[in-house]
C-alpha cells in the first residue's frame, strides 16, 4: 500500500507487532499531498483507522447480560490461526508473533500458506495472558508461563473470516510455528476500554473484572484474553480494547 506524503506512520510497528505506547500518535501528521497511486478511498480508510474505525470482520457473539461492570457474551464457533513463542525470539517483544501470523494470511506480501491464498484480516488480534501473574487462574490473544520472564511463553491468535467453518478449510501454513485450530462456542465476561493496553492497565482491568464476575456468582474457568481492534497508529483515545475472561 502506498501512503500519502505527509503522513508519518511507523509501519514497522505493525510489522514487528502491535506494541505501541501512548506517544506513538505523536509521529502522525495529517496528509498534505498524495502519492499518484494513492486514492481518496485509501486516504479515507487510513484516516478512519487513525480515528478508531473498525472496517474488518469481527467475531459473532450474543450478549446475554449487561451490567455497569461487564458484559456476558456467548461467542459462535470459529477457526483461528495462532502462534506460541518466547518473546526473546523477537528481541523481547511480546507481540512479535504478529508478523508470523500476518505472513500466513498474506498481509505483508505473498501468503505463507500452501495454496497460496490471501486471507482477510479480522479484528481483534487476541493475546492470551497468564492469569497467575495477576492473581487469576489459567483471543492480535497472548498466554504466558510463570517460570519467570525469561521462560514466559506467549500465544497470539487471529480469528479467521467466518467463511472458514472448519480447520481443514483454512489454507495450510508453510511456517510450522502457525497452528490452525477450531474454537467451539464459548462464554466470556468482557470489559471494553480505550487507550493503550499496557501491562499495568490490563492487569487492573482483569482483576476488577474477575472480582465482579465472582461477586455475581460466575465461575472463572481459564486464562484471560486481551483483544485489540486497532493498528498502532490509531490515536489512543479512539482505540478499542477488550479483556475477556472465560466462564462456565
Image (cartoon, grey):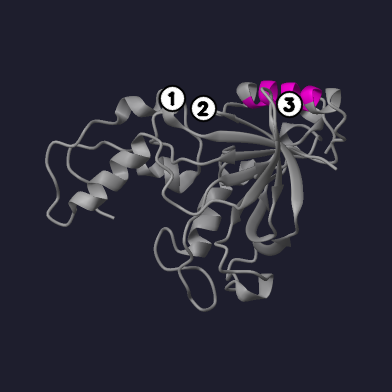
Point out residue 6 in the picture as x, y percentages from the top left corner: 18, 37
Where does the magenta region start and end? 202-212
Q: Secondary structure at mark 3?
A: helix
Q: Secondary structure at mark 2?
A: loop
User: Which corner quadrant holds the C terminus?
Assistant: top right
Q: What residue appears at the point 36 percent right and 34 percent down from the top-left corner?
A: 51
Q: Residue furthest bottom?
A: 115
**In the image: residue 174, left or right of residue 106:** right
| Upstream in sequence: badge 1 or badge 2 | 2
CA neighbours of label 3 inside 10 A, class few (<14), some (14 to 19), many (20+):
many
Find residue 4 and report its image quarter.
top left
Point out residue 104 in the picture as x, y percentages from the top left corner: 53, 63
- Which of 58/100 is in front? 58
Point out residue 122 in the picture as x, y percentages from the top left corner: 51, 54
Residue of label 3: 209
**In the image: residue 2, left or right of residue 67:** left
Q: What residue appears at the point 40 percent right and 23 percent down from the top-left corner?
A: 23
Residue of label 1: 237
**In the image: residue 112, left or right of residue 86:** left
| Upstream in sequence: badge 3 or badge 1 | 3
Residue of label 2: 194
Q: What residue appears at the point 67 percent right and 70 percent down from the top-left corner?
A: 167
Find residue 190 and report its image quarter.
top right
User: Which corner quadrant holds the N terminus?
Assistant: bottom left
Q: CA distance from mark 2 to mark 3?
A: 16 Å
Q: CB of mark 1 within 8 Å of CB of mark 2? A: yes
CA neighbours of label 1 inside 10 A, class few (<14), some (14 to 19), many (20+):
few
**Residue 227 vertical placement versus 134 (above, below):** below
Q: CA distance from mark 3 to mark 1?
A: 21 Å
Amino acid at each position: 500500500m502506498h501512503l500519502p506524503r505527509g503522513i508519518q506512520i511507523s509501519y514497522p510497528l505493525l510489522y514487528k507487532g502491535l506494541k505501541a505506547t501512548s506517544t506513538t500518535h505523536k509521529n502522525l501528521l495529517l496528509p498534505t499531498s498524495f502519492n499518484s497511486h494513492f486514492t481518496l478511498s485509501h486516504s479515507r480508510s487510513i484516516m478512519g483507522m487513525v480515528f478508531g474505525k473498525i472496517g474488518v470482520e469481527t467475531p459473532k457473539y450474543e450478549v446475554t447480560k449487561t451490567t455497569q461492570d461487564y458484559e456476558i457474551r456467548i461467542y459462535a464457533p470459529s477457526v483461528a490461526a495462532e502462534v506460541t513463542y518466547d518473546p526473546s525470539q523477537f528481541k523481547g517483544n511480546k507481540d512479535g508473533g504478529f508478523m508470523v501470523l500476518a505472513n500466513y494470511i498474506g498481509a505483508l506480501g505473498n501468503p505463507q500458506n500452501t495454496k497460496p491464498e490471501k486471507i482477510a484480516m479480522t479484528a481483534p488480534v487476541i493475546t492470551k495472558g497468564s492469569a497467575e501473574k495477576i492473581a487469576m487462574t489459567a483471543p492480535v490473544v497472548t498466554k504466558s508461563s510463570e517460570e519467570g520472564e525469561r521462560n514466559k511463553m506467549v500465544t497470539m491468535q487471529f480469528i479467521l473470516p467466518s467463511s472458514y467453518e472448519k480447520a481443514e478449510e483454512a489454507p495450510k501454513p508453510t511456517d510450522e510455528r502457525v497452528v490452525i485450530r477450531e474454537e467451539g462456542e464459548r462464554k466470556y465476561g468482557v470489559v471494553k476500554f480505550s487507550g493503550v493496553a499496557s501491562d499495568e492497565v490490563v492487569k487492573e482491568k482483569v482483576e476488577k473484572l474477575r472480582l465482579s464476575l465472582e461477586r455475581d456468582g460466575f465461575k472463572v474457568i481459564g486464562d484471560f484474553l486481551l483483544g485489540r481492534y486497532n493498528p498502532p497508529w490509531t490515536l489512543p483515545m479512539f482505540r478499542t480494547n477488550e479483556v475477556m475472561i472465560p466462564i462456565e
